[in-house]
Image: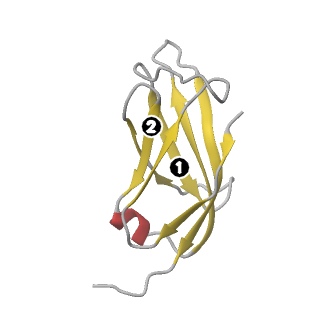
Amino acid sequence: MATYSNLFIDQGSDFSFSVDVSSDGVSPVDLSTYSGRGQIKKSYASSTSVNFTIVIDDSDTLTASLTAASTAALNPGRYVYDIEILSGDTPSIVTRVVEGQVEVTPRVTTG
């Protein structure tokens, strides 16, 4: 079962967060053969999304990030997101590791 965590993103700013992945809440998972993917959507049924860039930092940590240009394109308000890891097996085993709501706060400074 995925961890639930709400995110707050400043519109127009670079954003990143790290997730330590464990199999039982304690034991780390070796992510060396895994890849990751994640998206933000206005609602679960939305056809448009913004993709996180996922980097596996070390054997049990991944970092999800968005550029300032990506967050600038998000309208202020509430969204939903999730991050999944995919095993290097064929076929891949997909596991959702974190999910929640995103609150995008509006920017004042532009230009």
Name the residue nearer the viewer: 103 or 43: 103
Identify which residue is drawn at 54% across, 57% down. 48
Name the residue nearer the viewer: 42 or 59: 59
The spot of residue 67 in percent (x, y) is: 35, 60
The part of the image, by quadrant, that contains residue 76 is bottom right
Quadrant of the rendering where the N terminus is positioned: top right
Q: Amino acid at mark 1?
A: Gln
Q: Of circles 1 and 2, which is in front? A: 2
Q: Amino acid at mark 2?
A: Leu
Contact between labelled residues 2 and 1, with CB atoms less than 8 Å apart? no
Q: Is residue 50 left or right of residue 96?
A: left
The part of the image, by quadrant, that contains residue 58 is top left
Question: Label 2, on which residue?
Answer: 62
Choose the circle earlier in sequence order: 1 or 2.
1
Identify which residue is drawn at 40% across, 71% down. 72
Identify which residue is drawn at 56% across, 36% down. 84
Question: Label 1, on which residue?
Answer: 39
Does 66 appear above or below 83? below
The spot of residue 36 in percent (x, y) is: 46, 34
Alpha carbon distance from label 1 to label 2: 15 Å
Q: In terms of secondary structure, where does tag 1 sit?
A: strand
